[in-house]
Image (spheres, rainbow, N blue to C red):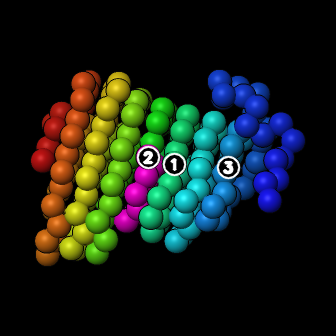
Amino acid sequence: GVQNLPFSGAHTDLNSLPTITGNVTLASNTQFSGFEVTGGVSSAAATAFIVDNSVINNAAGDALSITGAATSTLTNLKLTSGAGRGLFLNDSAATVTDLHVVNAATNGVEVTTGATSRIVTINNLTVDAAGQHGVDLNLGGAGSMNYTESGTTNIKSTGNAFYAALQAGSTGFLNLTMGTVNLASTAGAGVNL
């Protein structure tokens, strides 16, 4: 059954959250809510999970890394990565709402597909600083990607603010929908498709 941990999920403003030091691994059909993590949060082949109302700071790698998820829900997150990506969706589907990437050493958000088609929706995305691309979409293999950004999108990066590419040998397609966006890059393009 459901097991609530004391004080978790209690602060949707992301202040005064209970802290976890170390990495967190997600399991299928779970909810991780209301923590400040010093370390990374990841999943490998888990699905149907929720991560919400949390702050993740990982100095050593990706802040939030999800691999092979058929579904996931990510809501009200603040991510910082000193040596990787803010959010990495590796051949995964996700519904994302209110994502704030404070700083990412590489890409603010990176989404990849392989053999399986994936749907990713992001409503309200802020990337304050990305060392490479603000958003990086990569299609490799037969899988297609439906990617939708809606609400408010503000991205600042060193490389391209928004980058999408078909990798060599990819037979999938990208269906891209973007609403109102504000894109800024110090050394790349606003959009590079």
**Residue 105 visible to the viewer:** no
Q: What segment is highlighted magenta in the picture?
A: 87-95
Decide if residue 95 is on the left or right side of residue 111.
right
Write down the residue under mark 3.
Answer: 32
Q: Is residue 180 above or below residue 78?
A: above
Mark 2–mark 3 distance (CA, rounded to whole Å): 15 Å
Residue at position x 24%, y 29% in the image: 179
- Determine which residue is flagged by label 2: 95
Three-letter amino acid code at disc 2?
Thr
Q: CA distance from mark 1 to mark 2?
A: 5 Å
Identify the residue shown where x is 80% and y is 59%: 1
Circle 1 packing at 10 Å, graded few (<14), some (14-19), many (20+), is some
Label 1 close to label 2 by CB (< 8 Å): yes
How many other residues sit within 10 Å of disc 2, few (<14), some (14-19) or many (≥20)?
Answer: some
Q: Residue furthest right?
A: 6
**Secondary structure state at the residue bearing disc 3:** strand
Q: Earlier in the sequence, mark 1 or mark 3?
A: 3
Residue annotated with mark 1: 73
Q: Amino acid at mark 3?
A: Phe
Seen in the picture, residue 54 relative to 173 is either above or below; the reply is above
- Classify residue 173 as left or right of residue 134: left
Residue 119, position as x, y percentages in the image: 33, 55
Q: How many marks?
A: 3
Q: Secondary structure at mark 1?
A: strand
